[in-house]
Image (cartoon, rainbow, N blue to C red):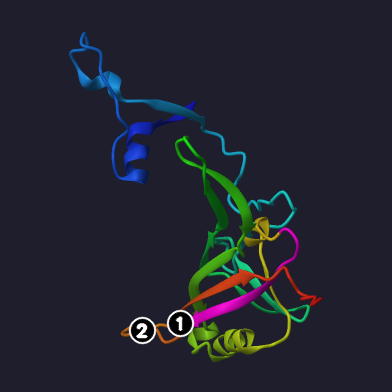
Amino acid sequence: MSNIYDLQALYKSQFGFSAYHIKPKSEETPIERDIFYSIPLENPRPKGSIDYSSKNIALNKKGLYGQDIWFPIELWKSGRKIIEIEACTVGVNLVKEIIRTQVSERKGRVKECFAIDDYKFNIKGFLIGKNRLFPEDQIQYLKDWFETTEPIELHGGYPELFLDESCRVAITALDFPEVQGKAVWVRPFTMTVETDYIQDLILK
């Protein structure tokens, strides 16, 4: 037994439009335009399963009430964890600097990778106070993490896929947006951190 999934519907749901499809002239009905894909009914990953990255770091965890929590992060300072954030999303921005050189009598330009910029992590989430209390301590942790001059690190199964040399980062922005008419024990935040691989600057 298997479940049937309409790939046309999945594509439209994901990307907002249907995949281009041409029907043969001999077709009288639109039935053949549906594309199906079969997936075995048995789930090899039951609820509560923990997935690990290629670095053997957990990508998800089981929450206090049995819910699945994906891509939690940990913020470290001077080699110790100061806070774990479960309710968040992590976006990654990768940019490299390209030198483009014109070549006589040829189309386009020769492209040379000059340098790869620091990776930027855009983190958006919520600080949730225990027992419906205002999460003042968690806000203070983030504030201290932003203001510290000590080494700071970003840990987690997803962000560490991009942190090859070390987990050391530098936080460049932290924002606690205005909230109206919401639960006082749930405070949103956004922050931007960048990789900080180069630790020593040598002057000659």
Callout 1 amino acid: Arg
Looking at this view, is 113 or 102 the one in front?
A: 102
Residue 29 x/y as whole percent = 19, 17
Q: Main secondary structure of the magenta part?
A: strand
Query: As drawn, is 58 to the left or to the right of 85?
Result: right
Residue in the image at 66% along x and 51% along y = 51
Vertical placement of 134 versus 91: above or below? below
For residue 187, which numbered disc appears in the image? 1
Residue 45 x/y as whole percent = 61, 44
Q: Under tag 2, what secondary structure? A: loop
Looking at this view, is 197 or 71 the one in front?
A: 197
Residue in the image at 42% along x and 87% along y = 184
Query: As drawn, is 185 to the left or to the right of 30?
Result: right
For residue 11, which numbered disc appears in the image? none
Q: Please state the extent of the stretch shown in magenta in the rendering.
A: 164-176
- Residue position marked by numbered label 2 in the rendering: 179
Residue 198 x/y as whole percent = 73, 70
Query: As drawn, is 149 to the left or to the right of 127?
Result: right
**Label located before the other in sequence (2 or 1):** 2
Residue 181 x/y as whole percent = 31, 84
Callout 2 amino acid: Val
Vertical placement of 73 versus 47: above or below? below
Q: Under tag 1, what secondary structure? A: strand
Residue 18 forms part of the magenta stretch: no
